[in-house]
Image (spheres, rainbow, N blue to C red):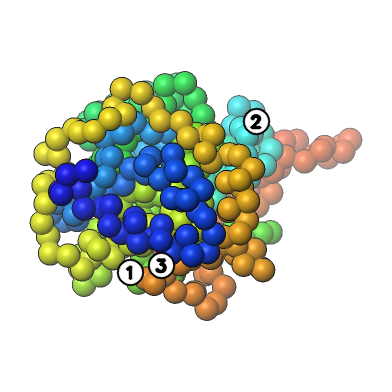
Amino acid sequence: MSSNHTAKSPNARVSRRFAALACVIVACLPNLAVANPQIVVDVNSGQVIAHEDAFRKWYPASLTKLMTAYTTFKAIRSGELSLESIVVMSEKAAAQPASKMYYKPGSKLTLDSALKILIVKSANDVAVAIGERVGGTLDNFVARMNADAQSLGMTSSRFVNPNGLPGKGQYTTARDLAVLAVALRRDFPEYAGYFSLEGINTGKKEYPNYNLLIGRFDGADGMKTGYICASGFNQVSSATRNGRTVVSVVLGADSLGARADISAELLQKALTTPRAGPRLESLAPYGPGRDTVADISAEVCNPQARKVRSEGRDEAGRMKLLSPYIHEMGRPPRTVFAGLIPGSEPVAKPQGSATANEIANVPIPKPRPTF
């Protein structure tokens, strides 16, 4: 690897620490170790601090929901809808595989709540419901996602759904995801609070953010995680210190903890390194894997890999985070409300009871601030 691809060093340090716990990335999963695209970028200057395999095609998994959020934010700004607009769970949305909220068809929530659930819980059913609300139809929304991606300069990305579930023809790169993350921070600073939430509560249950850096890495303020067997554990992260914001992308890690550790290393490097390097938009394509989408299912979803992941948890079932830059939160995550509009969930109708329209005709609460 050429000398300008400086991301290799933090990744190697993380791998060595994991090797002390168990024979993880390098020892147990050699194919995965060489398939670990990553990049870290200074948001204000657009300069790339470090990168490795940044143009290798990869399955985005739930990182797709960052594109869903971007397209939704554009629709809000254009006046098509607002955070108070109602999102209705359709049968198609409700039928999506987990991770999901299991809301019944006809259930209603504000777009504000839906966005919080999208980012924190990564609910596939809510992602589809948002897409249908914004686009009118799911196909229209996906077309808008792809148009927005091309407008941003995401030249090696294509989306086939708003939630990132496996689908033929869906792919991206670490470089393109960095373009998207920078655009979200630059273009929509008013919505940055959605990505830094420690957790949500639905009024019945609390859900912590899957992003293990939030509340544990100094300055962490976003953004999204994703996982399917074919992609491994992906993470887009952001952090701000002393007025400087950086974003990182890590693809193909072997566990929740590994993607957090590698992300912390990259963010720390960027926050403590003078701005230097090529600008993101001028980074020239390089390396193998630009014609086919990597599929690391065999390395990630096998008994040995699952055993390694289980050994990466403590006796309470929590991921062991080994980066020196990640600290214990020391308290329960702070949560904000994100749930159904009270009384909007369809129920079995006893004889002589109110109609479905009457049940759904309830006051709509104002969205709670996320900032």
For this orientation, the residue located farthest to the right is 351
Q: Residues within 10 Å of mark 1 (few under 14, many from 20)?
A: many
- Tell me which amino acid carries mark 3: Ser
Q: Position of residue 294 (x, y in %)?
A: 41, 30
* Disc 2 element: loop
Gap in angstroms between the C-alphas marked 2 and 1: 37 Å
**Which is nearer the eye, 282 or 341?**
282
The residue under label 3 is 323
Who comes first in sequence, dot 2 or dot 1?
Answer: 2
Residue 152: quadrant of the picture: top left
Locate residue 98 relative to residue 72 in the image: left or right.
Answer: right
Q: Quadrant of residue 365?
A: bottom right
Task: Assign a secondary structure to mark 3.
Answer: loop
Which of these two is toward me, 343 or 287? 287
Q: Is residue 47 left or right of 367 when viewed as pictured?
A: left
Image quarter (top left, top right, bottom left or bottom right) of the N terminus: top left
Give the labeled residue for mark 1.
Answer: 219
Going from N to C along the chain, the mark reached first, 3 or 2, is 2
Residue type, label 2: Ala
Is 26 situated above or below 177?
Answer: below
Question: Residue 11 at what x, y percent from top left?
Answer: 34, 55
Q: In the drawing, what numbered circle is on residue 95?
A: 2
- Secondary structure under badge 1? loop
Earlier in the chain: of badge 1 and badge 3, it is 1
Q: Position of residue 22 (x, y in %)?
A: 54, 59
Label 3, residues with CA under 10 Å away: few <14, some 14-19, many ≥20: many
**Compared to 217, does 279 lie above or below?**
above
**What amino acid is found at the position of numbered circle 1 in the picture?**
Gly
What quarter of the picture does the C terminus occupy? Answer: bottom left
User: What residue do we see at 52% from left, 78% from top?
Assistant: 330
In the rendered image of this protein, does residue 120 appear above or below residue 271? above
